[in-house]
C-alpha cells in the first residue's frame, strides 16, 4: 500500500473529518494495509492529542452478581452460570478504603461498578454521598457504572462531583438483540443522552468478539464519535464458562490492534482504553496497543484477573511512555518491587520459604 494512504489517514483524522465505511472496513480487514505503518499513523494522531502519557484506571466491583439483566457477555447476568462468588453492595467504608488504595497505586481514575438494570432514587442519593466523600478526600477522578439512569439522577450525581459515567454501547443497534434481551440499544442511548444533558463526561465503549461483523464495530465507532464521548473502553470478550456468550469469535492480536487504530482515527481526541481481554487477545503484541490507545486498567477487570500491576507498569516504562498523574513510573515501579520483595527492590534472591514451600518444619 502506498505511503500516501497512511499520511492521508493521519491528515484526515487530525482535520476532524470522518472516514468512509469502505475505508474503515479496509483498515480492519485488508492485508494490503500493513499493520506497522497503520500503527505509526494512529500513533501520530494519539501523540498530537495525548502525548506519550498513559492513564491508569482501577475498577471496583461494588457488588457481585444479583443482576436481573441477561447481557450474554456478563458473568453477573441472571442467565449466567459462571462460577462467581456473589456479594451484596460493599459498605461505604470499604469503598472509601479502596478509593484510597487506588489513589496510592497511581490510578488516575477510580471506577465503581454497580450491577443491575439501574439504581433506585434511594440508591442514587447514597451514591451521591459516597462520591462527595471520595472527592473531598482524594484528588482522583471518579467514574461510576450504574446501568440505566434518567436525567434527574444524572443531575444528582453530577452535583455530587461525579466526573464521568460509564455506560457502554457494547455493540451496534443491529447486533444488540443477539447479546441482550432485557433492555435495548435504545435504552442505552437514552442513558448517554441523560448523562450528557447533565454535563457528565461520557465513557462508552464496545466489546469485540461477540459474533459481530466488522460493520458493527464501525457503526459503534461512528455513533460514539457523534456523541463526542470523552473515553472509549475497547474490550475484547473474555469467554467465561457458563455465560451465554462463552465462545469468543476468532480474534487475532492483529485484528485487535486494527480495531484500536480505527477507533483512534475516528475519535482522535478521545481517551481510548485497552480494556478487558488485552492480555488474552493481544498476547505478545500487547505493548503495540499503546500506540493507538492511551489508557488501560490495572488490577484486572470486573470478574476477571488481569496482568500484575508490576508487569503493566514495566511494559509502559519499557516502551517509553509515562503515566498521567502525580506519580512517576519510576516511583510506582519502586513501590511495586518493594511490595514483591518485601524490602529493598534490589534484594531479589529467593529465601528458603520461596524455594521450598512444601518443606516440612523440623
Ligand atoms: S452488564 Fe450490567 S446490566 Fe448487564 S448483566 Fe452485567 S451487571 Fe447486569
Image: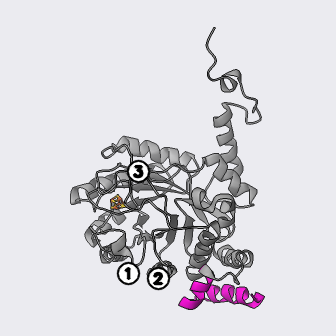
178 or 13: nearer the viewer: 178
Residue at screen point 43% across, 52% down: 241
**Does 84 sit above or below residue 354?**
below
Does residue 341 appear anywhere in the picture?
yes
Between the C-alphas of marks 2 and 3, the distance is 29 Å
Prevailing secondary structure class for the magenta stretch in the rendered image: helix
| Numbered disc 2: secondary structure | helix
Between the C-alphas of marks 1 and 2, the distance is 9 Å
Q: Earlier in the sequence, mark 3 or mark 1?
A: 3
Are the two marked residues, 1 and 2, in contact with CB atoms closer than 8 angstroms?
yes
* Image quadrant in which you'd find residue 268: bottom right
Query: Residue 361, labelled with which disc?
Result: none
Please identify, in this view, whether the residue under mark 2 or under mark 3 is nearer the observer.
2
Q: Which residues are magenta?
A: 1-28
Would residue 67 appear left or right of 97 to someone viewing this image? Answer: left
Would residue 144 appear left or right of 108 to someone viewing this image? Answer: left
Residue at screen point 77% across, 87% down: 3
**Does 334 sit above or below residue 68?**
above
Are the two marked residues, 3 and 1, in contact with CB atoms closer than 8 angstroms?
no
Ligand 1 quadrant in view:
bottom left
Q: Is residue 114 magenta?
A: no
Q: What residue sits right under mark 1 in the picture?
A: 174
Q: What residue sits right under mark 2 in the picture?
A: 219
In which quadrant will I find the N terminus?
bottom right
Q: Is residue 18 magenta?
A: yes
Would residue 305 appear left or right of 90 to someone viewing this image? Answer: right
Q: Position of residue 88 (x, y in %)?
A: 30, 45
Q: Earlier in the sequence, mark 1 or mark 2?
A: 1
Q: What residue sits right under mark 3 in the picture?
A: 61
Please identify, in this view, whether the residue under mark 1 or under mark 2 is nearer the observer.
1
Does residue 198 appear anywhere in the picture?
no
- Asked whether mark 2 lies closer than 8 Å to ligand 1, one says no
Amino acid at each position: 500500500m502506498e505511503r500516501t494512504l497512511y499520511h492521508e489517514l493521519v491528515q484526515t483524522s487530525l482535520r476532524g473529518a470522518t472516514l468512509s465505511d469502505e475505508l474503515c472496513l479496509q483498515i480492519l480487514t485488508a492485508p494490503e494495509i500493513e499493520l506497522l505503518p497503520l500503527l505509526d499513523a494512529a500513533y501520530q494522531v494519539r501523540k498530537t492529542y495525548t502525548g506519550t502519557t498513559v492513564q491508569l484506571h482501577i475498577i471496583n466491583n461494588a457488588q457481585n452478581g444479583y443482576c436481573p439483566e441477561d447481557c450474554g457477555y456478563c458473568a453477573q447476568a441472571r442467565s449466567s452460570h459462571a462460577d462467581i462468588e456473589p456479594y451484596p453492595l460493599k459498605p461505604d467504608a470499604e469503598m472509601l478504603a479502596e478509593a484510597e488504595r487506588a489513589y496510592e497505586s497511581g490510578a488516575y481514575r477510580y471506577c465503581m461498578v454497580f450491577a443491575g438494570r439501574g439504581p433506585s432514587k434511594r440508591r442514587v442519593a447514597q451514591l451521591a454521598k459516597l462520591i462527595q466523600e471520595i472527592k473531598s478526600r482524594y484528588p482522583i477522578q471518579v467514574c461510576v457504572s450504574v446501568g440505566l439512569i434518567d436525567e434527574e439522577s444524572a443531575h444528582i450525581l453530577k452535583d455530587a462531583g461525579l466526573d464521568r459515567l460509564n455506560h457502554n454501547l457494547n455493540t451496534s443497534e443491529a447486533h444488540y438483540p443477539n447479546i441482550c434481551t432485557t433492555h435495548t440499544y435504545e435504552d442505552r442511548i437514552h442513558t448517554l443522552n441523560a448523562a450528557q444533558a447533565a454535563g457528565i463526561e461520557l465513557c462508552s465503549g464496545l466489546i469485540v468478539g461477540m459474533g459481530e461483523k466488522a460493520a458493527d464495530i464501525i457503526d459503534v465507532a461512528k455513533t460514539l464519535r457523534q456523541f463526542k464521548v470523552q473515553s472509549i473502553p475497547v474490550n475484547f470478550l473474555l469467554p467465561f464458562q457458563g455465560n451465554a456468550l462463552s465462545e469468543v469469535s476468532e480474534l487475532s492480536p492483529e485484528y485487535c490492534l486494527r480495531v484500536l487504530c480505527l477507533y483512534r482515527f475516528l475519535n482522535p481526541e478521545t481517551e481510548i482504553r485497552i480494556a478487558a481481554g488485552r492480555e488474552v487477545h493481544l498476547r505478545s503484541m500487547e505493548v503495540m496497543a499503546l500506540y493507538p490507545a492511551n489508557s488501560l486498567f490495572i488490577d484486572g477487570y470486573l470478574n476477571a484477573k488481569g496482568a500484575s500491576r508490576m508487569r503493566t507498569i514495566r511494559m509502559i516504562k519499557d516502551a517509553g511512555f509515562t503515566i498521567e498523574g502525580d506519580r512517576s513510573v519510576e516511583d510506582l515501579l519502586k513501590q511495586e518491587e518493594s511490595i514483591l520483595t518485601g524490602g529493598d527492590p534490589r534484594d531479589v534472591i529467593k529465601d528458603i520459604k520461596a524455594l521450598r514451600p512444601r518443606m516440612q518444619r523440623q
